[in-house]
Image (spheres, rainbow, N blue to C red):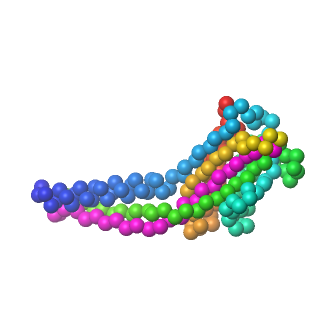
Amino acid sequence: MRPRQVTSVLSSALAVALLMLTAGSVAAQDVRYNFMPGTDFSKFHTYKWVVVPNANHPNQIVDTQIKDAINSQLSAKGLTSSDSDKADLYVAYQTSVDQQKQWNAYGMGGGWRFGGGMASATSSTIDVGTIVVDMYDPSTKQLVWTGRATKTLNPSSSQEKNQKNLNNAMAKLLKNYPPKQ
């Protein structure tokens, strides 16, 4: 192989590797949670939705979709939604939608027979949405559980895809609730 052909093949390989890395990182939702050690989560049976002052919230439609996704998961855990101030747990959420660069790479390696390969890369901007869910013990006025799911809200996607991402993210986020201590 001539040096120019080696450079073309390496460029193609790099472009394909970049494409695979980018595709995997953009599609994967990142879910993390934390909780207050020593909290007796078995005492929580009811919860009430509360609003965090000055927090970012989406429009009414997306707000309902988020709450429905969380309600579904909490209900599956044996918790009941309540409007009473005497609920065992207060639940709140916040959202954030940031923009991030996405690199789209395309490579076509021709090898030594075809005189080298070609590669190109373009960038585009995608919206990356994060939902943070907080749970408070109203009797102690303490945060007892918090979790975040990133790459969950994408305002440019279809409603069906957005709802599916949201449901999957909330299922992942609340999978380990109540936490094992």
User: Residue 105: horizontal and vertical position, in percent?
Assistant: 36, 62
Q: Which quadrant of the structure image shows residue 166?
A: bottom right
Tell me: residue 125, above or below residue 133: below
Tell me: residue 130, above or below residue 180: below
Q: Which quadrant of the structure image shows residue 57?
A: bottom right
Main secondary structure found in the magenta portion: strand
At x 44%, y 62%, the residue is 102
Tell me: residue 119, above or below residue 85: below
Total marks in image = 0
At x 38%, y 58%, the residue is 19
- Report the span colored magenta: 112-138
On screen, residue 37 versus residue 125, left or right, reads right
Q: Is 145 in front, or is 176?
A: 145
User: Residue 12: horizontal and vertical position, in percent?
Assistant: 27, 59
Q: Which quadrant of the structure image shows residue 174?
A: top right
User: Residue 28: horizontal and vertical position, in percent?
Assistant: 51, 52
Q: Which residue extends farthest left?
A: 2
For the C terminus, give its image quadrant: top right
Can residue 38 be seen? yes
On screen, residue 155 versus residue 177, left or right, reads left
At x 11%, y 58%, the residue is 2
